[in-house]
Image (cartoon, rainbow, N blue to C red):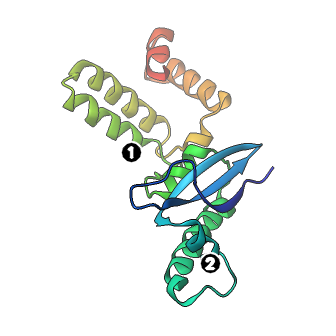
Amino acid sequence: MIPSAYLILDTRKEKKNKKYPAKIRVVYQRVPYLLKTGLDLTEDEFNGAMQERAPKGLKDAKIWLDAKKAKVDGILKHMDVFTFQKLSDAYYGKLKEATDIYPFFEQYISNLKVEDRLKTASGYTTAMNSFKKFDKKVGFYEITSDWLNRYHRWMLETEQGNSDTTVGIYTR
């Protein structure tokens, strides 16, 4: 099932300026999700901006809304595996590349150090270094039960000489 996106005016709560936020409604498997466009309009302004030929005072609003909708459509078109979180991250510019797990490790380790959780950060660093020895570049979608089984065998059989407990701690 393919997600669909629509421009809507969220009239559930009027703002102080007597306008409503224009949003993009994305529906996937009958579940709706709203994305902000950063534009507030009255109902008449929104209806005018939605026309094929927007009135003179609403052309900028139409261009803005069409650009935001096109951005969402482009993200949806190129998304292999859909989740609302992935869509939101891509739309708001927070998406990290899922083809490499190591930047996620490094960011989490950095956060642990900021929180002064140095032993936990050391454990994650050791696990990350072990994964890097086994596979220089691995993405989230490549980590399957087969990949984990190969890593487990590699940890036990190679010169690593690790125990099942060590492998369990690293993969946890």
**Residue 63 lies in quadrant:** bottom right
**Residue 77 lies in quadrant:** bottom right
Q: Position of residue 125 (x, y in %)?
A: 32, 30
Residue at the bottom extreme of this rendering: 56
Residue 89 in the image: above or below residue 108:
below
> Which of 30/10 is in front?
10
Q: Which mark is residue 164?
A: none
Amino acid type for the residue under numbered disc 2: Gly
Pointers 2 and 1 in contact (CB under 8 A)? no
Residue at point 41% right, 41% down? Answer: 104
Count the marks: 2
Q: Residues within 10 Å of mark 2 (few under 14, many from 20)?
A: some
Residue 157 in the image: above or below residue 101:
above
Q: Which residue is mark 2?
A: 48
Q: Which residue is mark 1?
A: 103
117 sits to left or right of 78:
left
Q: Position of residue 86 (x, y in %)?
A: 56, 48
